[in-house]
Image (cartoon, grey):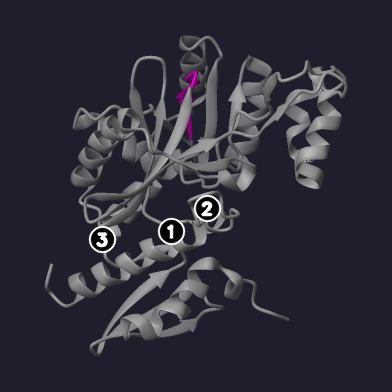
Amino acid sequence: MENLNSKRILVKIIKELQEELSFKAEFISEDWIIIITHNNKDSYIYGNHWSMNSATMQLIAKDKSATYDILSKNKIPAIEHKIIFSHNFQAKYTGQNGCWDEILNYAKKHEYNIVCKPNKGTGGNDVYHITNQLELESVVHTMLSKYPDLCLSPFYKIDAEYRAIVLNGKTQLLYQKERPFIIGNGKDTLLTLIIEKYKKAGLVFLENNMDKLSTVICKDEKIIISWKHNLGLGAKAIVVKDKSIIEPIEKIVNEASKTFDIGFASIDIVSTSDKYYVLEINSGIMMENFALQKTDGEYNYYEITKSIYRDALRFLFQTKEGKY
């Protein structure tokens, strides 16, 4: 059976860049670990994590609550993430006697309009928008049976979400995550339009639109069909060129990357009606879905991805060889 990891864009690009940058790459552990040898010195890529980032910063970046605590301590605007531990973790490590009152008080404070997610989750998996106590009880019970901890956040009315790829303190790429949507034609229902546009992949959008599926959508009316911005869940990357957006985002991204002293990262930023906030910092650079988008006008997404990985390798060689 073919190793699925061998199909990863990162693996493919590393293989393509070996001769150009004069390094040797060895792929082990089902291609999940890549050993990069340059000038007789080894560096490592584990999954999507590069060894120019310290282990401590990688652990903090994976922890949404810890990330929020550090950002807020440094007065960098960030989406609040309140950590809740499972009863097993509490009994062993914190001395707490349960968390339900804490959860309920938090939900009431925000009028049962909150988001519940794994503290160390990725890809938009198991992220829930809570609107009432019944949903709260069901989701929290399910989540704490699967994870040692979870996070609660206020539900923000997000106008847009962006991702910045940062290398050595500089933004290499900024793109907006455009949520899945359909445009009405005045004849077809929302259900028909979703399936026509997204085919089988559109089935995931049906549950959140159950009350509108049989509605005929007016001609040229735009309907957002998912509240999540993940590329892996149907969103599309739009490269940002507007300086009025780039400048304030770069400012907050630079502050965050400097605070974390992180060499290579992706930083997610959301905009609301009044300001920009850091949503999370990712020490694992996941560009698979971006790279797989079809060439769109002036942008070849695969070549953009390859260029970023090329620069990351050069920076990796510098840090490993003491030139940085």
Could you tell me residue 60's position as x and y percent? 32, 48
Task: Confirm whether residue 77 shows in the render.
Answer: yes
Q: Which residue is drawn at 22% across and 41% down?
A: 254
Task: Point out the frontmost of discs 1 and 3.
Answer: 1
Spatial separation of the CA atoms under disc 1 and disc 3: 26 Å
Report helix, strand or loop for mark 2: helix
Tell which of 94 and 166 is nearer to you: 166
Report helix, strand or loop for mark 3: loop
Q: For the magenta stretch, what is the residue range?
A: 151-158
Judge from the rendering whether residue 145 lies leftward or rightward of residue 209; answer left or right.
Answer: left
Q: What residue did someone put label 1 on?
A: 304
Task: Confirm or deny contact between disc 1 and disc 2 (CB under 8 A).
Answer: yes
* N-terminal-most mark, 2 or 3: 3
Amino acid type at image mark 1: Ile
Amino acid type at image mark 3: Ser
Amino acid type at image mark 2: Phe
Spatial separation of the CA atoms under disc 1 and disc 2: 9 Å
**Mark 2: few/some/many CA within 10 Å (<14, 14-19, 20+):** some
Task: Point out the frontmost of discs 1 and 2.
Answer: 1
Q: What residue did someone put label 2 on?
A: 290
The disc label shown at residue 54, or none = 3
